[in-house]
Image (tube, helix red, strand yellow):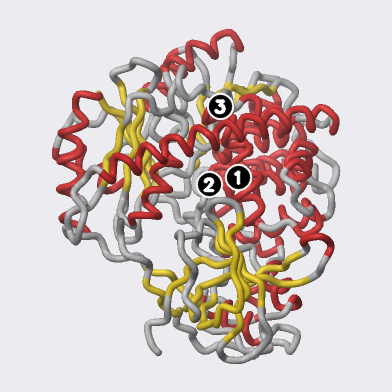
């Protein structure tokens, strides 16, 4: 296994002045993330980037407005992850709000259809007799599917956020901020964010045509869905995405979320009034994603489109049961993956720079989670493969990367050097998917190892854990914990604050099989603070003094209003 991460303190640029109500610790945290003034911290929806800046959004609005005016059938084709599910729900709800009377949706099945708009899915869409197909969170790589749809006389509007290849599909209109000629300032929109922007442009187009009296329908009612999809897809939370997520969280905290989301929040035992992006990432997103991983994401979309709270709770309960099954399958697969790694040569430089793992009984819907877990533990890129369906010779792979390696670019280089080795691929810098023949896995493993060795060297750089520095004796308070919790939204590219310091261990006990509960006394002074280290039990007592990296969290267990440290890393101090 790779060595423990090295704690590196973030650089803090000059900042301020700030109001006295903003603690110095929060000012420091903001500045380290590029927010150096109160204005940059204000998340007012009025500052959202204009839809006009998004390339071809006007053409998309024109196409949709014509379909609505002519009462044509619009079929939304989503994706089987949380971004695709929320994006589909946003598209269906938004189009209906804007006057579309014939709107339906179809989501590909991971095993039956594969990713995106495929020719097989187009065949299944014939029964719906669409006039216009609107893709959400997919389409930019679906050349054959787009061609098949247009060959049947259907219009095709692609909305996506994935990186395009060298050629684009022959759709009527493509809206994707990552197209090479698109000047949209934020390249980090999730799929759900892209389709939300298309709806904003459509509303203005319809308003200019006199379809409404006044400004038109309130599309902000969709922002809870936009927030969930954006956070769950792990896109960078740049300023524009933080505006979207913050607005969606406000709706959820005020009890104004869609019934399906409110049911999932309730079932996950999260406090709706203080919901955070972390709650979405760890509790809401996984329950939606589980449907697409093990069953059919249509169930998740039905939950998001449901307006009856009682029915929404029933659907949320089904999603919860599927998620519990997903956890079991994931743990079995992670255990098997770790066993595969243990059989590899160990020691300094012995592990390959990138791991390609495969077991014939793995589930294709869970390999991405396996890749993510192993990537975190080994701090090197990991690709996990499973048969596309039981007994199939086609493998579906999911890849997760580390800083410094752009996964999609690496796969593109493999494809250029070895044409035909990979059947199809796509994704982002940190996550990607691909498919290839099982017999070609050894050749692919050699090809991707060669590319990663060239780009990262034979041994990838060691893991680093970024810290926002020490907290003073008077800083470990409930008030600061609450302010930090609500100061986000925190997430990808705008990480939750992590602090570090040396503590004396005043007490400890094992909790369950793998966790460690501690009482820590700051060496700089102050009272003992409770701490929890999930997965921290090593089989022996912790040392009397420890260097701890931690998050400061509110603790409301059994009605108390206290604070605890959520330990991210614990080790003996490097200095006496």
Query: Would you name the residue on which mark 2 appears?
Result: 233
N-terminal label among 1 and 3: 3
Q: Residue at x 85, y 30 (%)?
A: 310
Q: Quadrant of the N terminus?
A: bottom left
Q: Mark 2 or mark 3: which is in front?
A: 2
Residues tagged 2 and 3 counted as in contact (Cβ below 8 A): no
Neighbor class of circle 2 (other Cα within 10 Å; few <14, some 14-19, many 20+) is some
Q: Secondary structure at mark 3?
A: strand
Q: Residue at x 75, y 23 (%)?
A: 101
x then y, percent, for residue 24 = 64, 87
Neighbor class of circle 3 (other Cα within 10 Å; few <14, some 14-19, many 20+) is many
Q: CA distance from mark 2 to mark 1?
A: 6 Å
Residues tagged 1 and 3 counted as in contact (Cβ below 8 A): no
Residue 308 showing in the rendered view: yes
Residues tagged 2 and 1 counted as in contact (Cβ below 8 A): yes
Query: Would you name the residue on which mark 3 appears?
Result: 77
Q: Secondary structure at mark 2?
A: loop
x then y, percent, for residue 425 = 32, 35
Looking at this rendering, what residue extends furthest in the top direction? 127
Front-most of 317 and 69? 317
Query: Would you name the residue on which mark 1 appears?
Result: 229
257 shown above or below 14: above
Q: Residue at x 61, y 34 (%)?
A: 324
Q: Quadrant of residue 433?
A: top left
């Amino acid at each position: 296994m790779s060595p423990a991460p090295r704690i590196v303190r973030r650089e803090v640029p000059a900042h301020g002045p700030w109001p006295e109500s903003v603690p110095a610790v929060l000012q420091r945290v903001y500045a380290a993330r590029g927010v150096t003034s109160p204005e940059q911290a204000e998340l007012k929806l009025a500052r959202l980037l204009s839809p006009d800046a998004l390339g071809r959004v006007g053409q998309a609005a024109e196409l949709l407005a014509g379909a609505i005016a002519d009462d044509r059938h619009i079929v939304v084709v989503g994706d089987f992850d949380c971004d695709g599910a929320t994006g589909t729900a946003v598209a269906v709800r938004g189009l209906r709000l804007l006057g579309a009377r014939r709107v339906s949706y179809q989501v590909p099945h991971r095993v039956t259809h594969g990713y995106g708009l495929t020719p097989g899915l187009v065949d299944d869409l014939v029964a719906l007799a669409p006039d216009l197909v609107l893709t959400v969170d997919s389409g930019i790589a679906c050349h054959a599917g787009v061609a098949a749809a247009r060959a049947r006389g259907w219009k095709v509007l692609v909305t996506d956020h994935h990186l395009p290849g060298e050629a684009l599909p022959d759709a009527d209109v493509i809206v994707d901020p990552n197209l090479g000629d698109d000047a949209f300032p934020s390249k980090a929109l999730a799929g759900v964010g892209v389709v939300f922007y298309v709806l904003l442009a459509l509303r203005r187009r319809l308003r200019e045509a006199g379809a409404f009296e006044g400004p038109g329908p309130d599309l902000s009612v969709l922002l809870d869905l936009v927030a969930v999809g954006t956070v769950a897809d792990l896109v960078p939370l740049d300023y524009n995405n933080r505006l979207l997520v913050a607005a969606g969280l406000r709706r959820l905290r005020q009890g104004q979320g869609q019934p399906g989301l409110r049911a999932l929040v309730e079932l996950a035992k999260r406090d709706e009034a203080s919901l955070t992006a972390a709650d979405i990432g760890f509790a809401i997103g996984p329950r939606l994603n589980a449907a697409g991983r093990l069953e059919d994401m249509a169930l998740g979309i039905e939950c998001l489109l449901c307006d009856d709270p009682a029915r929404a709770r029933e659907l949320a309960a089904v999603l919860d049961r599927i998620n519990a099954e997903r956890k079991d399958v994931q743990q079995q697969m992670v255990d098997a993956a770790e066993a595969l790694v243990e059989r590899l040569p160990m020691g300094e430089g012995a592990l390959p720079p990138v791991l390609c793992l495969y077991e014939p009984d793995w589930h294709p819907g869970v390999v991405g989670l396996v890749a993510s877990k192993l990537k975190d533990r080994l701090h090197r890129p990991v690709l996990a493969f499973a048969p596309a369906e039981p007994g199939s010779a086609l493998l579906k792979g999911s890849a997760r990367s580390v800083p410094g390696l752009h996964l999609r670019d690496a796969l593109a280089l493999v494809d250029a050097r070895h044409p035909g080795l990979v059947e199809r691929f796509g994704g982002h810098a940190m996550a990607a998917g691909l498919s290839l023949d099982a017999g070609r896995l050894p050749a692919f493993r050699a090809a991707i190892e060669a590319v990663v060795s060239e780009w990262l060297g034979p041994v990838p750089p060691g893991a680093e854990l970024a810290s926002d520095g020490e907290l003073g004796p008077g800083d470990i308070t409930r008030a600061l914990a609450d302010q930090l919790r609500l100061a986000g939204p925190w997430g990808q590219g705008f990480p939750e604050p992590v602090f570090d310091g040396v503590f004396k261990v005043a007490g400890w006990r094992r909790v369950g099989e793998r966790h460690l509960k501690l009482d820590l006394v700051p060496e700089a002074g102050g009272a003992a603070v409770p701490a929890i280290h999930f997965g921290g039990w090593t089989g022996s007592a912790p040392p009397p003094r420890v260097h701890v990296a931690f998050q400061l969290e509110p603790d409301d267990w059994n009605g108390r209003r206290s604070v605890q440290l959520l330990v991210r890393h614990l080790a003996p101090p490097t200095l006496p």
